[in-house]
Image (tube, grey):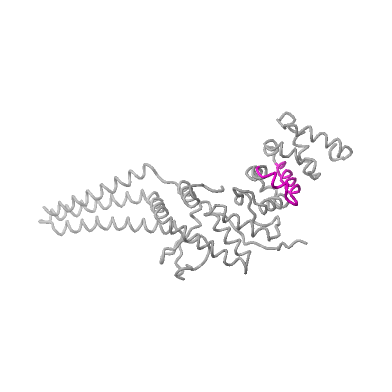
Amino acid sequence: MISYVILGVAFLYVVIHIAIYASRQRNPLTRDDMDEMLLATLNGGDKGHE
Amino acid sequence: MSKKKPVTFRPFKAPRYSFDKLRICRRCGRYTALNEERCTKCGKASLVSVEHYASARAGRKMHTRLLLVLLLTLVSVYFGDSTLQMALCGAGGLLLTGLFYYTQRKVRQNENLRALEHLLAYNIGIIKEGLELNRQEAVSVLRENDVLAYEKLREIAILLRGDRVARQRVALLHGFQLRKDMDLEMEQLLLREFEPLLAEYIGEIAKVRRDLIKDRTLRYVQAYETQIRQMDKGIAILTGVAGAAVRMKRYALLHSRFIGRYVHELPKDRFLRLARLIEANPYEPWNGLDQTVAEIREFKYRWDPEFQ
């Protein structure tokens, strides 16, 4: 019986992670967003001189 | 006599994304925007791009999770009461692992970017510290090698776009003899306040690289026109900029009043360019510039064959 319980735990672990991955995939990040965020943070909220 | 120094800059290409310039030391975690081989803090040759570093971290995390599922499968097989139970647990576990592996492969790109975002967001303080050290390093070589200092500041300026770095770059550029074949910049050097050295630099750029004088520079010059006029070569700078503005019809139309104030001083080739622009587009709103040009043409170039 214990082996089924352990497999159940593994199943839950996989399901939770797949759900997390799926939710992140719904709002994918782009390099442009990150570029903008980094420049804004480094230059005090200002995107600086483009 | 001019004290400007003839110099040659190393070729420089700005990366598409600013974070492409950033590297991290795998040993000590210091960030740098310069192109050094070894980390200046720990001396190890272990500098990698932040994107590479974040991808490796994301990959490690994914592998650990996959191994954990595999381990749980093995444990469940180990605790099986019968061969059938062991076989069922083994098959179920392998199926789960396969499904998990497939999902991880599908989302890998997005997870790499998430890891990069996490890395940059949580280490922003260390990044700022690293860039400040880079800036200090550039300033420290200023006396011995001003070209190297400028090149270093140019690299840092991809990430630090504030006035401080721009002002230092303008000050360094002031000592150099500018040439057409140089890797020059303009819009990236514009400051929030008036700076005479910058105004002089704009004047030089208007002479050697007219194509770099764009809308933001034209607006900067107009915002500080009074201060520039009061400078020694102020009128020459403003005339040069007005001459550069007639390069494009859009600029000539947008800044027609400004050009109108210096049209009398324009050299012949720039005046001819403006006259032809107006001639080709007589119904555009020139705000009186067309009349001024017609008067000057009549008065100054009446017998010039190029204007016939």
Q: Nearer the viewer, residue B71 or A44?
A: A44
Q: Position of residue B26 (x, y in %)?
A: 41, 64
The answer to whether B12 appears left or right of B249 in the picture is left
The answer to whether B69 appears left or right of B85 in the picture is right
Image quarter hosting the N terminus of chain B:
bottom right
B227 inside magenta stretch = yes
The residue range painted magenta reads: B223-247
A13 inside magenta stretch = no
The answer to whether B248 appears left or right of B115 in the picture is right
B24 relative to A43, above or below? below
SS majority, magenta? helix
B274 relative to A15, above or below? above
Q: Nearer the viewer, residue B41 or B78?
A: B41
Q: Nearer the viewer, residue B138 or B60?
A: B138
Q: Position of residue A48 (x, y in %)?
A: 54, 48
The residue sitting at the bottom extreme is: B43
Q: Position of residue B86 (x, y in %)?
A: 15, 56
The residue sitting at the right extreme is: B303
Count of marks, rendered view:
0
- Residue at horizontal 75 percent and vertical 47 percent from the top: B235
Res B264 quadrant in image: top right
Res A3 quadrant in image: bottom left
Image quarter hosting the C terminus of chain B:
top right
Q: Position of residue A47 (x, y in %)?
A: 51, 47
Res A28 quadrant in image: top left
- Residue at horizontal 62 percent and vertical 62 percent from the top: B10
